[in-house]
Image (cartoon, rainbow, N blue to C red):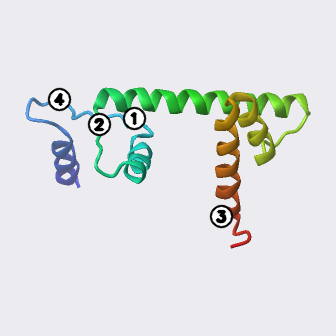
Amino acid sequence: MVAKKSAKKAAKTTEGGKKARRKTRKETYASYIMKILRQVHPNFGISKKSMLIMNSFVEDTFERIASEAGRLCKYSKRDTLSAREVQTAVRLVLPGELSKHAVSEGTKAVTKFTGGAK
C-alpha cells in the first residue's frame, strides 16, 4: 500500500521536485468567433490581438444584456429571467437594425431549441 502512494506522488512532481501546477482554464468565446468567421469568410484568419478584442466585445455585450434583463426582472417583480426579458434587453441595449437582427436570430434559436415548427 505504501509503494502505491509514493508512486502516485512521484507522478505528480516535476524534475525539480516541485509539484506540477495545473494550468487554470480560461473560458473564451474564441471557438464560437472562429465558427462565425468561417461562415462569413472561409479563407480569412484572425490574429491573437484581434481575437482578444472580439472576446472582450462579446463579454461586454453579454454583460450589458444580462444586467439589463436582470433589471427588467427586478422592476416587474419576477423571479425568473425568461426569453421575453432577454428580448426586451436586447432591444434596449443594441441600436436600431442590429437589435432587429438579433431579436430575429434569437427567436429562431429559441424555436429550434424548443423543437417548435419546422
Horizontal and vertical percent position of residue 2: 21, 50
Circle 3 crowding by C-alpha within 10 Å: few under 14, some 14–19, many from 20: few
Q: What residue type is labelled 1?
A: Lys
Along the line of sight, the residue nearer the viewer: 73 or 103: 103
Can you say whether 85 is above or below 92 in the image?
Answer: below
Q: Left or right of 37: which side holds 58?
A: right
- For disc 3, the marked residue is 112
Along the line of sight, the residue nearer the viewer: 61 or 19: 61
Mark 2–mark 3 Cα distance, whole angstroms, equals 38 Å
- For disc 2, the marked residue is 22
Q: What residue type is labelled 3?
A: Lys
Circle 2 crowding by C-alpha within 10 Å: few under 14, some 14–19, many from 20: few
Does the CB distance between marks 1 and 3 fall below 8 Å? no
- For disc 1, the marked residue is 26
Tell me the residue at 78%/42% (across/down).
81
Horizontal and vertical percent position of residue 22: 29, 37
Does the CB distance between marks 2 and 3 fall below 8 Å? no
Does the CB distance between marks 1 and 4 fall below 8 Å? no
Quadrant of image for the N terminus: bottom left
Q: Is mark 3 on a helix, strand or loop?
A: helix
Name the N-terminal-most of marks 4 and 3: 4
Mark 1–mark 4 Cα distance, whole angstroms, equals 24 Å
Mark 2–mark 4 Cα distance, whole angstroms, equals 12 Å
Tell me the residue at 79%/40% (across/down).
85
